[in-house]
Amino acid sequence: MPLVPAKDLMEWAEGENVAVAAFNFNNYEFLDAVCRAAADMNVPVILATSEGAIRYMGIEVIRPMVEATVGRYGITAALHLDHGRRFESVLKAIRYGYTSVMIDASDRPFSDNVAITKRVVEIAHPLGITVEGELGVLAGVEDDVSAERSVYTDPEEAKRFVEETGVDMLAVAVGTSHGAYKFRGEPRIDIGRIRKIRELTGLPLVLHGASGVYGEYAEKLGMEEARGVPDGILKEAIRAGIRKVNTDTDLRMAFKVGVLEALREYEGIDPRKYLGRGREEVYKMALRRLEVISKP
Ligand code: G3H
Ligand code: 13P
Ligand code: ZN
């Protein structure tokens, strides 16, 4: 099965009234675990790398490695650039076989965001590549950019943004943030805002910073103040129009738990012994996330 544009997966999600999970990966262990989980659940998946992940792995190896893994598990998947902040990074991803790209100029003024996103659409669409844009600013850390305060996406502005750029998917700021510390008090997402943006744009919407940050993992890692998006709220967001749900933090936490537990029992030097345990935990977490996201 070749890699497909994320737009095809959005159509599937629309038909099923579910969302597609986008998982970030930085190495083969994560990629393998996520593809195995998608195969077991019989659902499509979006495999995402940030600019940092590309720097870590080397862009030349990513598409071949992804294609081989997707083929091995017989799944349907898109290869996606997550938070492409520079026009050049997006061009590079396109050149190296990505089937979907995100241009994230959400920290720039509206007109600049429109201009750069539109340029990406003009290049990507003739090649059949899906484009995700972002409007609004998430709190917390977005790759190299940190936003002190979030700015929620304005629905009317989102309508104009979509009309002027022609993007296929829109990332919105509705209360989440990246990383393990998303909420100080009660977790809250502006579901009404999702509904409104959806109504005005008609587009598949993307929820960044969507990890659940599950208590048992936070506890094992000594991250007592960590808070994520509860599964029930995530399902509500999906019912309101979220079609792509990004998860990175949950996989990172699961991997660390697996590696730490393995190293507690194992004193040898064979990396497969502890990376393998990390991979197993990532697989279990990907299954758990897919249950919520693609089979809600
Ligand atoms: O959106 C942020 C993702 O978690 C990627 O994080 O830039 O550290 O790879 P990263
Ligand atoms: P989390 O940090 O909640 O996993 O979000 C990941 C993300 O949005 C990647 O783009
Ligand atoms: Zn993100």
Image (cartoon, rainbow, N blue to C red):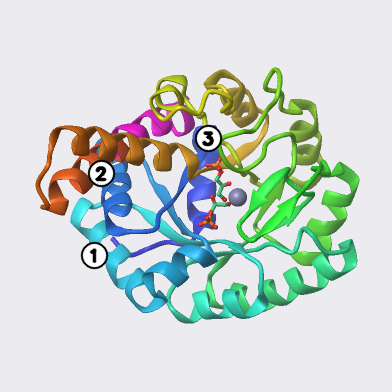
**First-in-chain label (3 vs 2):** 3
Q: Quadrant of residue 288?
A: top left
Q: Is mark 3 within 8 Å of ligand 2?
A: yes
Left or right: 148 with respect to 74?
right
Q: Main secondary structure of the magenta part?
A: helix
Q: Is residue 118 something that shows in the picture?
A: yes
Q: Nearer the viewer, mark 1 or mark 2?
A: 2
Which region is colored magenta? 283-296
Q: Is mark 1 within 8 Å of ligand 1?
A: no
How far apart marks 3 and 2 lie (CA) works out to 18 Å
Does the segment drawn in magenta span residue 295? yes
Q: Residue at x 24, y 32 (%)?
A: 261
Q: Is residue 166 above or below residue 275?
A: below
Of helix, strand and loop, which one carries label 3?
A: loop
**First-in-chain label (1 vs 2):** 1
Q: Is residue 203 something that shows in the picture?
A: no
Return the residue at label 3: 211
**Foreground residue among 184 and 288:** 184
Q: In which quadrant will I find the N terminus?
A: bottom left
Left or right: 293 with respect to 163?
left
Label 1 neighbour load within 10 Å: few <14, some 14-19, many 20+: few
Residue 292: x and y in percent read: 46, 27
Q: Amino acid at mark 1?
A: Ala
Q: Is residue 276 above or below residue 292?
A: below
| Contact check, label 3 and label 2, Cβ < 8 Å | no
How far apart marks 1 and 3 lie (CA) works out to 27 Å
Return the residue at label 2: 279
Return the residue at label 1: 68
